[in-house]
Amino acid sequence: MATQEETFKKMVAHCKEYGFVFPSSDIYDGLGAVYDYGQNGVELKNNIKRYWWEAMTRVHENIVGIDAAIFMHPTTWKASGHVDAFNDPLIDNRDSKKRYRADVLIEDQIAKYDEKIEKEIAKAAKRFGDSFDAELFRQTNPRVQEHVQKREALHTRYSEAMNANDLNELKQIILDEGIVCPISGTKNWTDVRQFNLMFSTEMGSTSDGSMKIYLRPETAQGIFVNFLNVQKTGRMKIPFGIAQIGKAFRNEIVARQFVFRMREFEQMEMQFFVRPGEEMEWFKYWKEHRLSWHKALGLGDEKYRYHDHEKLAHYANAATDIEFQMPFGFKEVEGIHSRTNFDLSQHAKYSGKKIEYFDPELNKSYTPYVIETSIGVDRMFLSIMCSAYKEETLENGETRVVLSLPPVLAPTKVCVMPLVKKDGLPEKAEEVMQLLKYDFRCAYDEKDSIGKRYRRQDAVGTPFCVTIDHDTLTDNCVTVRYRDTMAQERIAISELPALIGKAVDMKELLRKLA
Ligand code: ATP
């Protein structure tokens, strides 16, 4: 059996081989943590975005969309706090010249203590058999207790240093714990420095007096600065939401795990404006609603979990992540945050404009509170790919790679195949293409054996293959072959649109959410 890591590597290679994801500027050997989506990847990505967009703007009549510019007035980022506080602490190893996030090095060290504890427990469980009480052992075994104490002491020291923004203390922790660079194996560390994750550039020519501007690190601020525009022109009544899909940029220090952590990525964010005091109800609503959006795709309910934040940003009064079980552990795919009135108040302060809502029912004005749902398109893409990629051994001993994508998201819905390239079969196949192509994204394939053609479609996740044979010319029936079960069935051509339509219909998914 392949390990999860090996399967993950194969999945990444598969993404390139089958036109889902390429390294950016591939002919120049790529650019760190930047990727391009290929012919199949873009279709899958667009389908994910469509599913999110419609779940927001169609299922909820009180949510509307916008598409704000990537460039924003620089004061935006002063007001939002990103100029001063959107930082990661970084540290370099002088021998390997490698750069790390100091917080990640320490968190990895904490995880090592956890591993040691779990190992001791697993060892004892083996020794004692059925009568083993893991909790009792954890509380009483001296070796485990020693690890637990060290772990707790480190965790406390680390949290205090992070909260106080104490960079010297972070370095001291790294030295005291004897953390070494995984490449050079040495403790020859530089001081810890703050590193702002925003990319900046210049706007305007220097003679005009150019202006330093930023590539947005999140799409949310484009929504906040447009709050009044949308509320007034759309005559929106609280509670209401504004949704947006767009690119965001972060100069991540350590970018890894394929499209999980990129320097240019895409977000789908929705800010939901509510009455002050009602935010906890809405937080609960969005927390549940967003999880049901994920689960409706059928990737497996057990693959999701919430991770409630213990440490909240100073302006937030509740926050949770929806995590997905990736091959490298449960990881955040989406964040749901109760942001109080922080952002709107900050923009009011910095712009000098009054950003309030007059509530006709309460007959008073206030600054609305905000619940945010924020999900990365690329992380969503990755979670779908990780759960869809399968290597199967068939009954006859052959193997196949299949992407069991939810049919509604699959790049291609159906592949039409004439059994042979003669006897009028391609012409008949063309008729079938004409019948289907305006409703579904179709592929046409007449090359190689039918078996090989099926494999090619399995590899890109096409849920249906339709074969036209000699009998089709007289009985107007075709063979439909299903991707997951590989079962085959003969049906009339006229029944195809309904059969495929039912399986790939996004309406069915959206209704589940209502
Ligand atoms: P992390 O802790 O993993 O860096 P975050 O908490 O900084 O993520 P948010 O600022 O809450 O992330 O952003 C919302 C969503 O945007 C995340 O849940 C994730 O799906 C996506 N996202 C954030 N940073 C990246 C990135 N560098 N590459 C791809 N997606 C990202």
Image (tube, rainbow, N blue to C red):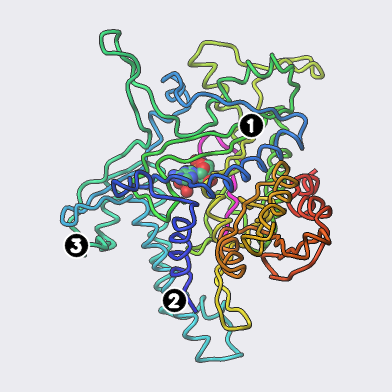
* Numbered circle sitting on residue 144: 2
Secondary structure beneath label 2:
helix
In which image quadrant can residue 392 be found? bottom right
Q: CA distance from mark 1 to mark 3?
A: 48 Å
Tell me the number on the disc at residue 215: none
Q: Who comes first in sequence, dot 1 or dot 3? A: 3
Element at label 1? strand
Q: In the rendered image, which quarter contains the C terminus?
A: top right
Q: CA distance from mark 1 to mark 2?
A: 49 Å
| Residue 311 in sight from this viewpoint | no
Q: Position of residue 449 (x, y in %)?
A: 58, 68
Q: Position of residue 221 (x, y in %)?
A: 53, 27
Residue 204, compared with residue 309, is above or below; it is above
**The residue stretch that appears in magenta:** 311-324
Secondary structure at badge 3 equals loop
Residue in the picture at 67% in, 32% down: 272
Q: Residue at x 42, y 57 (%)?
A: 155
- Report the disc number at residue 243: 1
**Kind of residue sitting beneath label 3:** Thr
Q: Where's residue 395, x and y in %?
A: 63, 82
Give, as a three-letter code, the residue at label 1: Ala
The residue at 50%/24% (across/down) is 69
Q: Residue 427 appears at what percent x and percent y?
A: 69, 52
Rendered image: mark on residue 186: 3
